[in-house]
């Protein structure tokens, strides 16, 4: 799964990597080293076939448009790639409302000697990458919330010691097709959901990351494992 991640990268580099224009000072792109569920996160979307890509902020934790209560989002921070067509919560968004979630790393916890040791997973070159995601617009009475979820897949041999699941890190070559609203064939979409973990590295970090109140680049610094 993916329960915490980071986004700490030069906005100009994010514009280049995602082929977008970011107007003015975008507060969502200030360095963040401990992004947690229910917080607002930066999301790249293409609303319709005539529109270009744009960056917006959405709440992390998908709220289906038919939900009675927004609290359902707390349980929907991740969506399994293998069951997107089966779950009513994701089925329509999978066909029509896909997105990219910029990140520079994510955390996973491993039980070692009876305690949970956090690990930080990042690109070897410390570059930015994209999680594959879905988004929704929930309207209820006077509330209007845009929300998102991160799609996960089974880990490969490289990351299997950390967890059985990992976020789908979408290759840059697949970004255009993934965002294109006219592509709704689920077989073709599934073929896009591959992750290249050869570019990744991971190492143990401080347990300070356990609390979302803690922030700062020190959370991503290597420490000795338990």
Image (spheres, grey):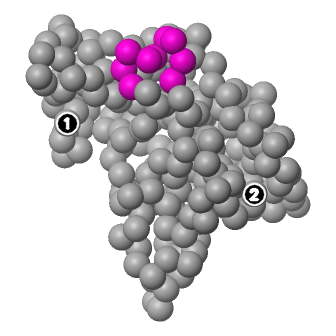
Q: Is residue 27 above or below residue 3?
A: below
Residue that carries the numbered disc 2 in the rendered image: 95
Judging depth in this view, the residue of 175 and 155 nearest the camera is: 155
Q: Residue at x 34, y 28 (%)?
A: 108
Q: Which quarter of the figure is the N terminus placed in?
A: top left
Q: Quadrant of the C terminus?
A: top left
Residue 114 position by quadrant: top left
> In the structure shown, which secondary structural element does the residue marked by tag 1 occupy?
helix
* Left or right, residue 19 beside residue 106: right
Farthest residue toward the bottom?
141
Mark 1 is surrounded, within 10 Å at the Cα level, by few (under 14), some (14 to 19) or many (20 or more) other residues, namely some
Residue range of the region highlighted in magenta in the rendering: 155-163
Q: Which residue occupies 46% across, 89% down?
A: 142
Q: What residue do we see at 19% from left, 11% from top?
A: 225
What residue is drawn where x is 77% and y is 43%? 189
> Is the stretch drawn in magenta largely helix, strand or loop?
loop
**Where residue 183 appears, x then y in whole percent?**
85, 51
Residue 143, above or below 78: below
Q: Is residue 206 left or right of residue 140?
A: left
Depicted 88 relative to depicted 139: above or below: above
Q: Is residue 96 magenta?
A: no
Q: Residue furthest front?
A: 86
Q: Mark 1 highlights which residue?
A: 210
Cα distance in 3D space between marks 1 and 2: 35 Å
Q: Quadrant of residue 199?
A: top right
Q: Is residue 45 left or right of residue 24?
A: right
Give the structural element (helix, strand or loop) at label 2.
Answer: helix
């Amino acid at each position: 799964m993916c329960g915490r991640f980071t986004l700490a990268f030069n906005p100009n580099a994010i514009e280049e990597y995602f082929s977008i224009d970011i107007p003015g000072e975008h507060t969502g792109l200030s360095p963040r080293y401990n992004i947690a569920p229910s917080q607002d996160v930066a999301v790249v979307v293409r609303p319709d076939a005539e529109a270009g890509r744009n960056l917006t902020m959405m709440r992390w934790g998908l709220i289906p448009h038919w939900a009675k209560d927004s609290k359902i989002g707390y349980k929907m921070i991740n969506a399994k790639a293998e069951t997107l067509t089966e779950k009513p919560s994701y089925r329509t968004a999978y066909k029509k409302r896909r997105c990219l979630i910029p990140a520079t790393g994510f955390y996973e916890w491993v039980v070692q000697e009876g305690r949970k040791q956090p690990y930080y997973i990042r690109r070897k070159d410390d570059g930015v990458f994209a999680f594959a995601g879905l988004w929704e617009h929930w309207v209820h009475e006077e509330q209007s919330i845009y929300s998102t979820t991160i799609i996960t897949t089974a880990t490969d041999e490289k990351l299997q010691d950390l967890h059985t699941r990992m976020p789908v890190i979408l290759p840059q070559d697949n970004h255009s097709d993934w965002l294109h609203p006219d592509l709704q064939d689920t077989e073709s979409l599934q073929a896009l959901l591959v992750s290249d973990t050869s570019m990744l590295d991971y190492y143990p970090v401080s347990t300070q990351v356990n609390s979302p109140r803690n922030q700062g680049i020190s959370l991503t610094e290597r420490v000795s494992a338990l």
